[in-house]
Image (cartoon, rainbow, N blue to C red):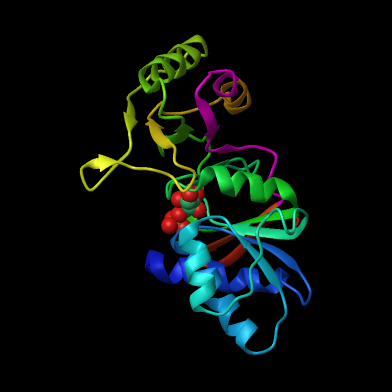
Amino acid sequence: MTDAASLKDKAGRAALEYVSDGMRLGIGTGSTAECFVRALGERVAGGLSIVGVATSERTARLCEELRIPTASLDEMPELDLAIDGADEVDPELRLIKGGGGALLREKIVAAAASRFIVIADATKRVDVLGAFPLPIEVNGFGLTATYLGIRRAAERLGLAGEVRLRQRGGEAFITDNGHLILDASFGRIPNAEALSEALHGVPGVVEHGLFLGLAGAAVIAGDDGVEILGQA
Ligand SMILES: O=C(CO)[C@H](O)[C@H](O)COP(=O)(O)O
């Protein structure tokens, strides 16, 4: 069996096939996205000309280190392609994202791109989203009220489970946008569209990690090779 790190690297490198000269490129966050960025860095060093928009400060630093040219999304608000990892991918290419805490910028960048391709190892494939706790980015003001609002919205849809404030090193995790993350362990989410809409209706919720109708294709690396789902 191939280890997860090698599969992430395979998926990241395979995605390079969809990158061409002159592209305005959304660049994701996480360990799989990092494999893509490192492979992209090699191509840029070899003469490929692209401009990237990073989905996090972490990715921006890596791009700088690898001398990959970047711009802000305001400088380049329309992108040809975005490539990013995911925590879960279902058969309809609906995703859970945000394990790395970058979901807000990731969603804005994915939505700004004409095409959004997900890269993942095969362990990320699921039949129904929800085994991975759903990250929800929230404002710090009124955290408890927002927490209760999320619970009530989920309960109305028959979803329940632990909702925990994400911590890092004993302190609340703060996103690049200065917000907090609540990780909601609702279990199977058969009604992702309804949940997405309901969460957007809770004041204090900035964004959530359900990426619905955004990904056009997924590059999935498994023991038997790389599989492309959807239209890349
Ligand atoms: O959404 C993300 C970051 O916010 C990541 O893409 C997601 O967590 C997958 O990460 P990894 O490739 O490290 O498994």
Q: Where's residue 137, x and y in %? A: 47, 35
Quarter containing the N terminus:
bottom left
Residue drawn at (50%, 23%), measured in percent from left and top?
A: 204
Q: Nearer the viewer, residue 125 or 199?
A: 199
Q: Where's residue 221, x and y in %? A: 53, 64
| Quarter of image, res 48 | bottom right
Residue drawn at (56%, 58%), measured in percent from left and top?
A: 28
Magenta stretch contains residue 208: yes
Q: Where's residue 187, x and y in %? A: 41, 28
| Quarter of image, res 150 | top left
Residue drawn at (52%, 50%), measured in percent from left and top?
A: 86
Q: Nearer the viewer, residue 218 or 223?
A: 218
Side of 25 relative to 127 (left or right): right
Q: Nearer the viewer, residue 202 or 142?
A: 142
Side of 156 relative to 109 (left or right): left
Q: How many marks?
A: 0
Regarding residue 147, the answer to whether it shows in the image is yes
Magenta stretch contains residue 58: no
| Quarter of image, res 18 | bottom right
Side of 208 relative to 183 (left or right): right
Q: In the displayed orientation, state which residue is furthest to the bottom.
A: 46
Q: Which residues are magenta?
A: 198-216
Residue drawn at (64%, 74%), measured in percent from left and top?
A: 69
Side of 206 relative to 81 (left or right): left
Quarter containing the C terminus:
bottom right
Q: Is residue 17 above or below residue 192?
A: below
Q: Is residue 89 above or below residue 117?
A: above
Q: Where's residue 168, x and y in %? A: 27, 46
Regarding residue 223, the answer to whether it shows in the image is no
